[in-house]
Image (cartoon, rainbow, N blue to C red):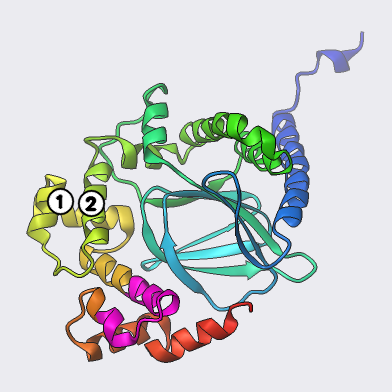
Amino acid sequence: MDTAALTPPRQNDSSTMENAALIRQREELTGILQRHCPDDGAVETVIPGLRLFRGSTTDAPTCAIMASVFAMMVQGAKRITVGDEVYDYDCQHCLISSVDLPMFSRITCASASEPYLGLGLILDPLKINELSAAIPKNRALDAVDRGIAVGTISADIQGAALRLARLLDTPADIAVLAPIIERELLYRLLTSPLGSRLRQAAAAGSHSHQIVRAIDWLKTNLDQPISIDRLASLSNMSKSSLHHHFKALTAMTPLQYQKQMRLHEARRLMLVSDADAASAAHHVGYESPSQFNREYRRMFGTPPGRDVAQLRQSQPA
C-alpha cells in the first residue's frame, strides 16, 4: 500500500503555500509600482484614496499628519514614530492607522537599485462602520487600543491590494471595480488581528469613537486654548477618563497632541503659503514668538526659517 497517500499534510504546508503566494503577489506589485511611481516621492493615483511611494535613500526623518490609512510595501523598510513609540515594518508587514496622528517617518532600507516601494489607501470610517455591521463581533469594543499598529500581512490582504493596484493599468475599469475591491480589502483588514482598531474608531458609542470627537475638535480649533473640560464634555467622559483613553489611542496627552498638530500646521503654512514664522505661529494659536521658535526647534531640529529653507532646497525643481 502507498503509505504516502495516507500521510496527512504537514502542518507547515499551508504556511509554505501562503509564503509562495505572498512572494508572487509582491513580485507583480513591484512591477506595477515601478511603472506608475518611477521617481522618488509620492504619487496620487486616479483611484480615489490610493497613493504610491518610492524612495532610493535613507534620509533624515520626515514629519506629517498620518490620516486613517492602510499602508504596505513590497521593497525596503520604514520606521514610524508616534509620541515616544516606534513602529518598524517591511514587505512582510502592513500598517494601519485609525485616527489622524502627527508622526515622524524614515525609510530605513532602500537603495538606487532596490528602492523602497509602497502604497497607501486612505480609510473611510463610514465604509468601515457599514461593513463592520455585517461582520460577527468576536470582541467587545470597550477597550481602547492604540490608533496605529503593525501586523503581519496575509496573502488575502496583499492580494486585494494587488487587484486594486492592477486597475492602474486598466483605468476604464476603475469606476466599477475599484469600489468592489476596496470593499474586499476593508473586509480583509476588519477580519484580521488589526481589525478591532478600525472598528473601535468608527463605531458610535465606543470609547475610541468618543475620543475621535475630541481629536476632531482639536484639529479644527488649533488656534484655541485647550480646554480639558470642553474635550471631556465632547467625549462624554470624565476628565480622568478622557486623559486615559486619549493617551491609549494616540500615545500622547491632549496637550501634546495639540502642540504637535500646531507645529505641523505652522510648518505647512510657511512651506506652502509662504507665511513668515510670526504669522504662522499666530495662525495656530501661539501668542509668544519665542515660545513658538523654541518648541519648533525642539520638534524639527532647526529654527523655523532655516528649516523651511532646507525643505525648499530639497524639493525637486
Asked if labels 2 and 1 touch by Cβ distance under 8 angstroms, the answer is yes
Q: Is 64 drawn above or below residue 275 in the view shown?
A: above
- Placement of the C terminus among the 4 image quadrants: bottom right
- Tag 2 secondary structure: helix
Q: Is 254 drawn above or below residue 303 in the view shown?
A: above
Residue 280: x %, y % from top left: 30, 79
Q: Residue at x 68, y 35 (%)?
A: 172
Left or right for 204, reference 33: left
Q: Is residue 265 magenta?
A: yes
Q: Residue at x 64, y 50 (%)?
A: 92
Identify the amino acid type marked 2. His
Span highlighted in magenta in the image: 263-281
Instruction: Using the rendered view, name the quadrant where residue 108 is placed.
Output: bottom right
Identify the amino acid type marked 1. Ser
Label 1 belongs to which residue? 241
Q: Is 56 drawn above or below residue 173 in the view shown?
A: below
Q: Residue at x 49, y 64 (%)?
A: 80
Distance CA(mark 1)–CA(mark 2)? 6 Å
Residue 224: x %, y % from top left: 16, 68
**Mark 2 crowdedness (10 Å alpha carbons): few <14, some 14-19, many ≥20:** many
Label 2 belongs to which residue? 245
